[in-house]
Image (cartoon, grey):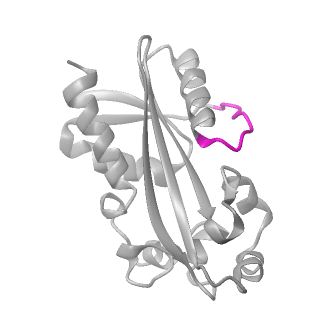
Amino acid sequence: MLSLHFATGNVEKFEIAQAACKPFGVMLEQAKLDINEIQSEDSEVIIRDKAQRAFAVLKQPVIVSDDSWNIPALRGFPGPYAKSIDHWFTPEDFLNLTRPLQDRRIILVQLLAYQDEHTQKVFRKEYEGALLTEARGSYGRPLQKVLTMPRDNGLSVAEAYDRGAVRAEREVAAGWQEFARWFVEDARA
């Protein structure tokens, strides 16, 4: 079993990553680091800097993640600022903003970045969901209550977690599986 630090304080992200990587023989160890993220509208610039900072602190190979939520009808809002917006907005605020939109798509951009002393590799996956017209569920952040992803059968992300959604079966597990395959086959070769 290969071991690697995953620098995150987000328990949900850690559980998904751990469940997705384990079948590939990759055991993730959570490293809760206080890393100041740079501000940018370019998610890849953010993730590359975050990976370098995490490696500088740990002095060991590390993986980091960063998610952006893009609403095409709002020109990509909230983008890399989704985490901050989730602190300010309520589910009702999201509904008020998106209610008049005809294009109800929302796209999750998942970035993972591996960093060691010689290599930095970024993995990018996009997952398309849909904005709901009402808030549903009690789990998680405001945005999770007003969007649905394809595998959730019309449930909000919050409702899916309320009902015990299996972490390894979430769409975002695919990005982690791609990383784990690369880590086992290429990075350690």
Question: Residue 151 at x, y = what percent?
Answer: 35, 74
Residue beneath the point at 58% across and 79% down? 104
> 161 or 96: nearer the eye?
96
Question: Residue 170 at x, y = what percent?
Answer: 36, 63
Q: Is residue 130 left or right of residue 95?
A: left
Q: How many marks?
A: 0
> 177 or 101: nearer the eye?
101
* First to last magenta residue range: 34-43
Residue beneath the point at 22% across and 30% down? 184
Q: Per the image, is 40 magenta? A: yes
Question: Residue 142 at x, y = what percent?
Answer: 66, 70
The quadrant of the picture occupied by the C terminus is: top left
Chief SS of the magenta region: loop
Q: Is residue 13 left or right of residue 53?
A: left
Residue 154 visible in this rendered orientation of the protein: yes
Question: Residue 86 at x, y = what percent?
Answer: 71, 62
Q: Is residue 27 left or right of residue 136?
A: left
Residue beneath the point at 70% across and 68% down? 74
Q: Is residue 148 left or right of residue 104?
A: left
Residue 1 visible in this rendered orientation of the protein: no
> 130 or 29: nearer the eye?
130
